[in-house]
Image: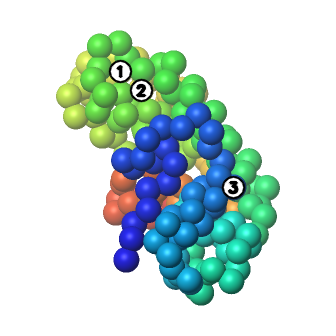
Amino acid sequence: AYNLDARNHGDSEWSDEFDFDLNAEDLLHFIDEKNFPKVVIIGHSMGGLTGIKAALKEPERIEMLFVEEKFVKKVPQAFMDDALSYMNVWREAEKFIPPGVDKEDADNFITEYVLRKTRPQNIILKYSRLGRTSAQYKTFRVSSLEKFSGSTLKNSKAAICLRDYGIDVLGKIKFGVKDHPKISDCI
C-alpha cells in the first residue's frame, strides 16, 4: 500500500502549477513508475476527486475506487452558497482579532466569531488565555450580542441544506468541536 502526497500537500515540493487534472496526471505517473498494471485507489476529499479524474482518464488502470467525503456529481448550489458565506465571515473575523493575542487565541476568536455570526443559538466560548473579564473580550462579546442576538439560522435555507446533506461544516470538520452537544443538536 502507498500513501501518495498530492502536489503542494504533505511533504511534496511546492509547485506553482496546481489543479485536479495535474493531480490525476501525477497519480497516473506514479502508477507507471511503480509498473502497476491496475490499482485500487482510496481517496479522501481531494484525493477522491484525483482518483475520479484518473479513473475517467484511464479506466483500464483503476480496478476499484473508494471515495470518501467528496461529491461525485455537481455540488448543490445551496452548499456552495453556504461555503462562500462561511469563508466571507471568516475573512471578516480576521479583521477583528484583538491585538496581542497568540495564534491559538486568534483561532479561538475566529471560531467563536464564525459560530456567533452563523449559529448564534450554539455559542461555544473557547478562549484559553484571553480571559472573559478582559476588556478585549467584553468589547467583542457586547458588540456581537447586540449584532447577532435576534437572529437564528436553525431553520434557514443554509442550515436545512447542511442537515439534508449530513454536513456539519463548522462543528465536525473545521473547528474540532465535533463532540459538543450544542453543535450536534444544531445539525
Mark 3 and mark 1: Cα distance apart in space? 49 Å
Q: Amino acid at mark 3?
A: Asp
* Visible residue check, residue 157: no
For label 2, the SS is helix
The numbered disc on residue 138 is 1
The residue lying toward the viewer, choosing from 175 and 153, is 175
Residue 61 drawn at (x, y percent)? 63, 80
Q: Secondary structure at mark 3?
A: helix
Q: Residue at x 34, y 22 (%)?
A: 137
Seen in the picture, residue 135 relative to 44 is either above or below; the reply is above
Label 3 vs label 2, nearer the camera:
3
Task: Decide: is 93 above or below 160.
Answer: above
**Image quadrant assignment for residue 109:** top left
Q: CA distance from mark 2 to mark 1?
A: 5 Å
Whole-percent x and y of residue 153? 63, 50
Q: Would you name the residue on which mark 2 appears?
A: 141
- The residue that label 3 is drawn on is 21
Which color scheme is applied? rainbow
Q: Quadrant of the N terminus?
A: bottom left
